[in-house]
Image (cartoon, coloured by chain):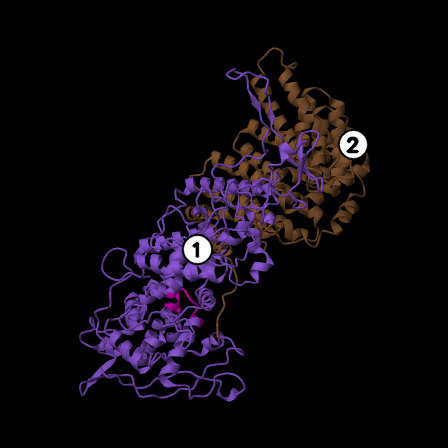
Amino acid sequence: MDDEHTAWYREACAQCAAVDWGLSDEGRFYCRCCHNVIERTKEVVDTSSAPGSTRVSTIGRGSRTKRPEGGRQWMVCEGFQFILMKQANALVQLGVSPQFKDKVLCQLWRLYLQRSRQAYTHNPVRSSKFKLRSLDSDSDSAAESAVTAFSETDGDANLSSTAGSNAESSSGWSQFSGSVDARNYLGPRMKRNCGLMSMKKTLALIHLALVWSREPLTLSDLLRFATEGHVPYLNAYEELPEEMKLDGKDGFIFRVESIPSHHTLHKEAQTLLLFLQLPAFPPISRQSLLHPALLSLRYLMDANLPDELHPWVCQLLERAGMAEHSLHTFDPVSHPLLPRFDLQSVALIIVTLKVLFGLDDHTEWDLSNVAGDHGDSENMFSLRRWYRLMQAALITAQQRRNQHIARKQWKAKKPLSSSKMHINIVMKQKRTAEQVQACFQKLSSCPVGVQPAEPSSFRFCWGDEDGADGPSLHHQKLDSAVTLSHNVHAASNSTYWHPALRACDPGKCRNHYPEVEASLPRSLVWLLQLFSFMLDVTPACLYEEVLGVERRVFGTKTPNGCGAEETNRTDKKTRRKCSQRC
Amino acid sequence: MSTERPEVSGFRQSTHICLEKIREAMLHHRWHEAAEYMAFYPQILEDRTRTSAATNKELVWRLSTEILHHHPKSKLEDYNNIYERMKHSGVKLYLLVSLEHSFHLMLHGHIVDAKRQLSVAESWRYGKESAAQYQTIKLIQAYRSLLDYIIWCDKKFTHSDLPNFDDNQEMQNYFRQASVNLKEILKNPGVWDPFILSYVEMLEFYEDHEEALKVLNDYAYDNSLPPNPNAHVYLYQYLKRHNAPQRKLMKVLKTLHVLVPSHELMLEYSALLLQSEKKSDSEKVLGMVLEMLDFACWRRNLDVWKCLKAVIEKLQLQDDWRNIVSGKMSERKDWWPALHFTKFHASKDCEDPELMGVKVALVQILCPDLKCTKYTAGEGSKGQ
């Protein structure tokens, strides 16, 4: 019978999933259960020709769809693994120690795979039968293969499971395009898992790995590198190897619409932390660069503030009880919140400035007048002069950033699309766009694919060389704001104001900054805008952090600022005596 | 306590800011800057939301052409490039962009290329779309014919020294191609002056006078077309060229008079009417000339005043001429002095003594109650 032609073909029928093929009259394969005819035909062999003759000896009609060169099957998490590796390599290039990638990120990734039951588990999320190879030594994460932990199926990729993702192949033969489980990935069952990887999560995972390795690359730095393209994020899937082909469904998983905000990513990292059930992190001591004591030095430099401010920041740190490493280290039991190192440091700086200069729209300008009247005004730090310098630099930097945003190209070179017809339309639109772009590029002689700016931890550049944003004020003295009496340096400004400090119930109210902003002194508002530009966060976020620091310093015995007690709605100016021991 | 930025995708934010920058640059005429930003904007065409796709294409088309118009380094090939791209980017835009493309080529002298564009556009079909855009198609057909006419003119000019002038086959072809559409043009209401003129010129050349006359008559008198004084002017000029009888000429001019009483052809009409014997015609002429002078544009025209003088002289042959004149002037005598006979007018008219003379002669007849003007007291008077 025709079993000899069809018996070897073990592909499941697309309609009924049975494996029972017969041969129709025209020589096509058909399923005996549901009579579904597929494209495959039996091979026709002409045996009448003698060997060695020049006639064509076989006429084979194989499957209609050719196997694309070098394609292979791959899972979605393989793709993410590859992308993570690229991102980690980029960070190592930027100066992060390789330990972060080999010892920390790798382990975190495997832990993630285990927890989300995509690998390293006896109970995988999918129903397919994958054989797990034994784990090799993990120190080698060289580039030749990103799939050391996964095994490919035996033989010729005859998957009997995951019939869903193979259903679209018309010949019943695996198409080798697109990941195998993309459909499952997007389906409701796995979504309920809540552990699914996403592009945002890659950055969150990297952030956790960086914090664990105590690298001084903060979350805002990471986001900035992602925006500028130093760390692959936008269209990162284009760097997947040739053999891992993507199709439309993968687009939903791998495509990004925007760079996540600081706040979103922090929440993502927090969720991931709980999902992974990590133990306590290595402690962030005073010596580590993520500790506010040292991190604030960096922000002081970037903001062109005098180095003499740093001891004051450290004093404030002591006062607020924030010098302990336990406050900055994640611990699932005692400190289950991931700290925001960058925001904390900057908030400390702001509070220090508030202590020294008042920032109530009067004191700071009086002190600036004192500095101006002083004989040695060149070396005296004057807030007015600093403000003028910073404002000019800030405006220029903001305009430059807007320019970059306007010029940023978001669309991938190889767009993904779910259907063949749609991809044609998409490619046509792309060609039109490119042609119009080329025409204007020629006209304006301005290259579109400009190299991103040199990566730098600093937003501004202070000094005397070309391209600097202004003269450096780091060497200036704080004598106008500080008095020396009885060998104790004390702030000239003797009062400190703060709004009502008791924390609102997070369930009941959201951030109050938009309502409060109009009543705050303009100096403080401007300062918040400056630092939130530097960190690329919203001023409201920063304001919350500042309030947090003030709470630590002064306690929360003051009345609530919102809610039912309307009588205490307005700011309550509390007079405190300020003195610092040097 | 948390703050959330509103969910705007980075792509949307980038394109929005880019568009703002382009707009700012264009409004301030900073064309280099506009071209620079325009190089970054076309990614909007790859936006996957279907609702804004058509708007985006139109936006890119119009911005690009506007920048090319003003940018000092733009060349014709840039225009061609952009037009070709945007034409084929979407179904709704194809005809409009083709039309604009051919206008551009026409204005820069590339008549044959322009015609080719329109021919291609004319044969474009796309189901419901081409049916929905039939007005644009009509325009395309009309302009294609006009371009055929222009080429015909060129050929006429270049071949005018050849012996077999009339039988030139090429010219015949173009004439035929052009007349296919031009014949149908009048079925669509509109103002088709240049098209009609070109058609009539070609018809005159081939001595098809019947057709020419029919076309002109239809154009002038068809009620489905908007009233167009030019139609009557063309008809009149044609009739005059072909020595039509006075009766016909006067008929055309009569309709024209109703439409545009201040038309310059009214002078010719008056001349024609003055030749007739009927008394009522003289009255008509008086009324007509006075109506012409109601319009300030004829104030200093010597011919009109002379015509007025002539008609009044003719009227004076009748007995009741004063009644006739005062009857016509009754509705005017309040404001005519201010219109024609003030001190200011006198000071200007002094430069033209002949005009002054005519006006002085007429002022007493037309406005007998008017006293103490430079016109009544004569030259060198001390009238206020």
Label 1 SS = helix
Across and down, in percent, residue B66 comes to 51, 44
Q: Say which mark, if any, is on residue A405.
A: 1
The colour one sees for chain A in the rendered image is purple
Residue B274 visible in this rendered orientation of the protein? no
Q: Going 64% across and 22% down the picture, which residue do you hit?
A: B174
Q: Say which mark, if any, is on residue A162.
A: none
Span shown in magenta? A529-540
Front residue of B250/A582: it is: A582
Amino acid type of the residue that numbered disc 1 sits on in the rendered structure: Ile
Label 2 SS = loop
Q: Going 47% across and 85% down the picture, which residue do you hit?
A: A560
Q: Which residue is mark 2?
A: B276
Q: Is A441 left or right of B308, judged from the image as shown?
A: left
Give the number of the mark in front: 1 or 2.
Answer: 1
Same subunit, labels 1 and 2: the answer reads no
Is residue A530 shown in magenta? Answer: yes
Q: Residues within 10 Å of mark 1 (few under 14, many from 20)?
A: many
Figure quadrant of residue B147: top right
Q: Residues within 10 Å of mark 2 (few under 14, many from 20)?
A: few
Q: Is B355 left or right of A395, judged from the image as shown?
A: right
Cα distance in 3D space between marks 1 and 2: 81 Å
Q: Name above or below for residue B306 compared with residue B33.
A: above
Q: Chain of mark 1?
A: A
Q: Going 39% across and 82% down the picture, which residue do you hit?
A: A551
Say if mark 1 contacts mark 2, CB within 8 Å. Answer: no
Front residue of B326/A244: it is: A244
Q: Name above or below for residue A217 compared with residue A139.
A: below
The colour one sees for chain B in the rendered image is brown
Front residue of B309/B144: it is: B144
